[in-house]
């Protein structure tokens, strides 16, 4: 009867999704207590299945072609967060949608792979893998991947090469709309070779593709594994509201265009090699960031609008050029505050082709060593406007420019928690000269008023909604 009905439907030219009303979206909890029952439950899981791991050690395997839904995901979770421990095997979530992995303690030695999948969520997990060198701990890749979320996890004590989190894609398109938020990335040991970033977004051969990833509200603490703590290698990403503490490296726009880095706090604590943001490529925006106590310079300056190895006019479709350092063009560096760094706003420290047509506006720089603004190579068409410099001690302004470009005046910053804020009577108040409509609030999350203040701070009585992150704000709940 049903077959005849289906034949009639097909004959009528309709396409139907065949759903079994007995199982679709039904919520089923399956308790498991050993690796064999875990494997059986993973194999049998359907939309709405929740696999609950009793306390203990497990070997884990693959999860393939599991199509959960928004309202009925497939969930694998610990009965008691942190008490179920993965000690062997490899989880690969493949060709799947709406799968959640929650509350597990990962101590195995293989990459957790999210492959060709969408709406996968990894949350409240602890990762301390015993990995061989070069292993990434979490890897998103494959065709048509995206909308995955990695949140509230703790990644710590990586001693060998490899990234904590890597986002790749398919042959021509990087994974899109992934969100990495509220994680703790801690204690990555320094490496002698390239490839120990905390997060790598993309890969050179996909750098022309748009990822629309958001990396926000993460704490990076003692991440010393690479000169790039976060390496952005695709286009149209947002990195905001993160705190970088005593990490020897920078947030880098290494490849790709149109990336926005804002509202981040970099606290170096005087540790060697600590840096801020390094730029290559086109149309990058850097605003509302706060930099203090950083000791790096050159590759690890607080801001490095770096030189390129190829010009911005080079052929973007030429695969042999994809891994190059692309000349900076049309960068905007505005409304940032720098306090007590060894180097601050640097331009063109490395490579051949200095930046073109970029804007450095309405920043506040206070320091007692070195040049507050430095051009290692003269950029072309770089606009300075509305900036404030206050050199003390041995410091110099570094550039001899008219006061409407760099004004030498004490901005009257005062220590206030971990961020030095403006105080009443500061000449930075209402002093911004540019028009940057995307700068809608400040580093504290307070709204900009009709006459924005120079630097990352708006002097305001509005509620403070963001602060430098500590371990209490991020990572697992347990
Ligand atoms: Ca104002
Ligand atoms: Ca403020």
Image (tube, rainbow, N blue to C red):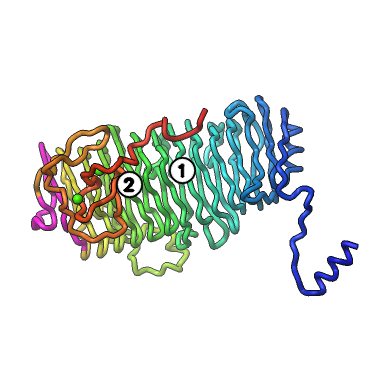
- Lateral position of residue 106 relative to residue 43, left or right: left
**In this view of the protein, which residue sits in the foreground, 419 or 160?**
419
The magenta span reads 382-407
Can residue 138 be seen?
yes
Coordinates of residue 397 in the picture (x, y in percent): 12, 48
Residue displayed at 58% across by 55% down: 145
**127 is higher (above) or lower (below) than 348:** above
Residues at discs 2 and 1 in contact (Cβ within 8 Å):
no
* Quadrant where the N terminus is found in the figure: bottom right
Q: How many marks?
A: 2
Can residue 196 be seen?
no
Q: Earlier in the sequence, mark 2 or mark 1?
A: 1
Coordinates of residue 456 in the picture (x, y in percent): 25, 47
In the rendered structure, find residue 357 and report the number of the disc placed on it.
Answer: none
Helix, strand or loop for disc 2: loop
Helix, strand or loop for disc 1: strand
Residue receiving disc 1:
181
* Extreme residue toward the bottom, this view: 12
Magenta segment includes 406? yes
Residue receiving disc 2:
263
């Amino acid at each position: 009867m049903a077959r005849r009905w289906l034949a009639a439907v097909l004959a009528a030219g309709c396409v139907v999704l065949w759903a079994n009303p007995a199982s679709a979206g039904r919520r089923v909890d399956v308790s498991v207590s050993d690796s064999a029952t875990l494997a059986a439950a993973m194999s049998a899981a359907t939309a709405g299945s929740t696999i609950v791991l009793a306390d203990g050690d497990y070997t884990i395997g693959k999860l393939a072609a599991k199509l959960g839904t928004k309202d009925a995901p497939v969930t694998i979770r610990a009965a008691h967060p942190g008490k179920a421990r993965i000690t062997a095997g490899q989880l690969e979530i493949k060709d799947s949608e709406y799968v959640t992995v929650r509350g597990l303690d990962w101590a195995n030695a293989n990459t957790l792979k999210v492959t060709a999948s969408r709406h996968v969520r990894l949350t409240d997990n602890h990762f301390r893998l015993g990995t061989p060198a070069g292993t990434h701990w979490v890897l998103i890749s494959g065709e048509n991947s995206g909308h995955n979320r990695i949140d509230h996890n703790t990644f710590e004590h990586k001693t060998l090469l490899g990234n904590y989190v890597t986002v790749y894609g398919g042959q021509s398109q990087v994974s899109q709309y992934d969100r990495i938020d509220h994680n703790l990335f801690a204690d990555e040991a320094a490496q002698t070779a390239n490839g120990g970033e905390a997060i790598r977004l993309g890969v050179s051969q996909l750098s022309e593709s748009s990822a629309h990833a958001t990396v926000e509200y993460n704490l990076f603490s003692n991440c010393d594994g690479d000169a790039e703590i976060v390496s952005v290698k695709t286009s149209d990403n947002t990195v905001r509201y993160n705190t970088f503490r005593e990490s020897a490296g920078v947030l880098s726009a290494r490849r790709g265009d149109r990336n926005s880095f804002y509202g981040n706090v970099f606290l170096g604590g005087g540790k060697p090699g600590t840096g801020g943001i390094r730029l290559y490529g086109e149309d990058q925006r850097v605003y509302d960031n706060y930099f203090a106590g950083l000791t790096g310079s050159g590759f690890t300056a607080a801001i490095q609008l770096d030189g390129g190895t190829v010009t911005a006019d080079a052929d973007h479709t030429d695969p042999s050029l994809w891994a190059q350092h692309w000349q900076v063009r049309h960068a905007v560096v505005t409304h940032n505050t720098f306090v007590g760094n060894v180097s601050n706003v640097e331009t063109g420290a490395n490579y051949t082709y200095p930046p073109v047509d970029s804007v450095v506006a309405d920043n506040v720089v206070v320091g007692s060593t070195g040049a507050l603004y430095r051009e290692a190579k003269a950029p072309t068409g770089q606009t300075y406007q509305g900036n404030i410099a206050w050199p003390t001690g041995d410091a110099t302004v570094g550039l001899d420019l008219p006061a409407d470009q760099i004004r030498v005046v004490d901005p009257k910053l005062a220590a206030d928690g971990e961020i030095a804020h403006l105080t009443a009577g500061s000449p930075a108040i209402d002093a911004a000269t540019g028009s940057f409509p995307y700068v809608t609030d400040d580093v504290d999350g307070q709204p900009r008023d009709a006459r924005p203040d120079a630097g990352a701070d708006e002097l305001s009585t509005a509620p403070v909604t963001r602060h430098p992150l500590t371990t209490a704000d991020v990572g697992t709940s347990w």
